[in-house]
Image (spheres, rainbow, N blue to C red):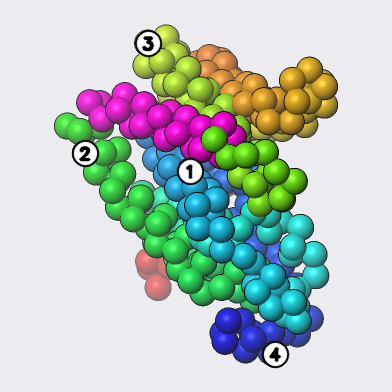
């Protein structure tokens, strides 16, 4: 707690604003958007890599939270203060940090697979700043963020050869998808079936996350089967089609996430609606929407093609001028 007391003592409005903004880069919704962006528009294998790293990381993270039951800093010391409304997103037990896990897994995965140095630098900076923000805001201890970050790094290192070694990848994928499913089932059984129902918000949070992960893993199995044997989509498309593909697709995903919540909640209760809703989200994002990517790959809008060529020529011209100097 000593480092947290030190950070509490140097807080100021500028840093409060900065770290309150940075910490959102470790949230679930942004992870979902980035994973979908990579899966649809950049490279399918890299999308799987980031997505599955996130799945495994979240399962391990939530299991450790529920098992170890380590309280948040303000519970350990009631006199310790938290910045703004940071407590709102700080659900569940403290150890390990979920935001740190998500940020390091997501942006670390992008850094590992990117060939552009500026992308690597930005992603590494975010992967460092998000854990720091969790301590500055007062919602996690150094051990929390180190454990979350370390787990993400370990998963990235373990999974990297399974995704990017050509000899291993095709053979490994069915086992990876199966392992995600089995791990999510095990966590569901532990958090929902075998853990007594409680009004404790930590137990409720674990149960919610277990149901979310189980729904996602059911969806992942369907996506893998559809993509392997039926859809076999490619990510290539003109730049304007990528924007349309991403914008419309994400709009539908977020619509499913928001609109279906209330009717499903009324039909089947809090936990089980999450299983169905997140299954539908993953099934649509990975199995249904990619069925029309062939159309986007062939679509051409001449005016926008010429505009893209003009912009590209401007950058090429600047690059030539710099090289001449």
From the viewer's perspective, is 228 left or right of 236?
left
Magenta stretch in the rendered image:
170-193
User: Mark 4 and mark 1: span between their CA atoms?
Assistant: 35 Å
Residue identified by numbered label 1: 59
Report the quarter where the N terminus lies.
Answer: bottom right
| Number of numbered markers | 4
Which numbered disc, 4 or 1, marks the residue that appears first in the sequence? Answer: 4
Which numbered disc, 1 or 3, marks the residue that appears first in the sequence? Answer: 1
Tag shown at residue 9: 4
Contact (Cβ within 8 Å) of mark 1 with mark 3: no
Which numbered disc, 3 or 4, marks the residue that appears first in the sequence? Answer: 4
| Residue 114 x, y percent position in the rendering | 38, 51
Which numbered disc, 3 or 2, marks the residue that appears first in the sequence? Answer: 2
Judged by depth in the image, the label closer to the viewer, 4 or 1, is: 1
- Helix, strand or loop for disc 2: loop
User: Mark 1 and mark 3: span between their CA atoms?
Assistant: 28 Å
User: Mark 3 and mark 2: span between their CA atoms?
Assistant: 21 Å
User: Is 177 placed above or below 295 here?
Assistant: below
From the viewer's perspective, is 124 left or right of 304?
left
Residue identified by numbered label 2: 165
Residue identified by numbered label 3: 229
Label 2 neighbourhood size at 10 Å, few (<14), some (14-19), many (20+)?
A: few
């Amino acid at each position: 707690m000593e480092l947290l007391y030190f950070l509490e003592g140097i807080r100021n409005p500028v840093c409060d604003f900065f770290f309150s903004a940075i910490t959102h880069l470790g949230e679930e919704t942004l992870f979902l958007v980035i994973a979908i962006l990579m899966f649809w528009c950049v490279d399918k294998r890299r999308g799987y890599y980031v997505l599955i790293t996130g799945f495994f990381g979240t399962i391990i993270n939530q299991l450790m939270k529920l098992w170890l039951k380590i309280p948040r800093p303000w519970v350990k010391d009631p006199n310790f203060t938290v910045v703004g409304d940071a407590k709102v997103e700080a659900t569940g037990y403290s150890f390990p940090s979920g935001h740190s896990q998500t940020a390091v897994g997501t942006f670390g995965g992008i850094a590992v697979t990117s060939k552009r140095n500026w992308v690597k630098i930005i992603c590494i900076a975010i992967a460092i700043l998000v854990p720091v923000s969790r301590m500055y805001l007062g919602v996690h201890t150094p051990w929390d963020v180190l454990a979350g970050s370390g787990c993400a790094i370990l998963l990235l290192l373990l999974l990297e050869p399974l995704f990017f070694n050509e000899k291993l990848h095709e053979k490994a994928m069915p086992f990876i998808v199966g392992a995600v499913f089995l791990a999510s089932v095990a966590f569901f059984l532990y958090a929902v079936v075998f853990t007594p129902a409680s009004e404790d918000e930590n137990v409720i949070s674990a149960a919610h996350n277990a149901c979310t992960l189980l729904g996602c893993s059911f969806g992942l199995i369907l996506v893998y089967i559809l993509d392997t044997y039926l859809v076999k989509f490619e990510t290539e498309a003109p730049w304007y089609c990528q924007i349309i593909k991403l914008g419309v697709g994400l709009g539908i995903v977020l619509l499913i996430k928001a609109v279906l919540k209330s009717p499903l909640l009324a039909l089947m209760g809090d936990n089980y609606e999450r299983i169905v809703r997140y299954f539908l989200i993953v099934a649509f994002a990975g199995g249904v929407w990619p069925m029309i990517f062939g159309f986007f790959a062939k679509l051409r809008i001449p005016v926008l093609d010429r505009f893209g060529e003009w912009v590209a020529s401007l950058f090429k011209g600047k690059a030539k001028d710099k090289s001449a100097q």
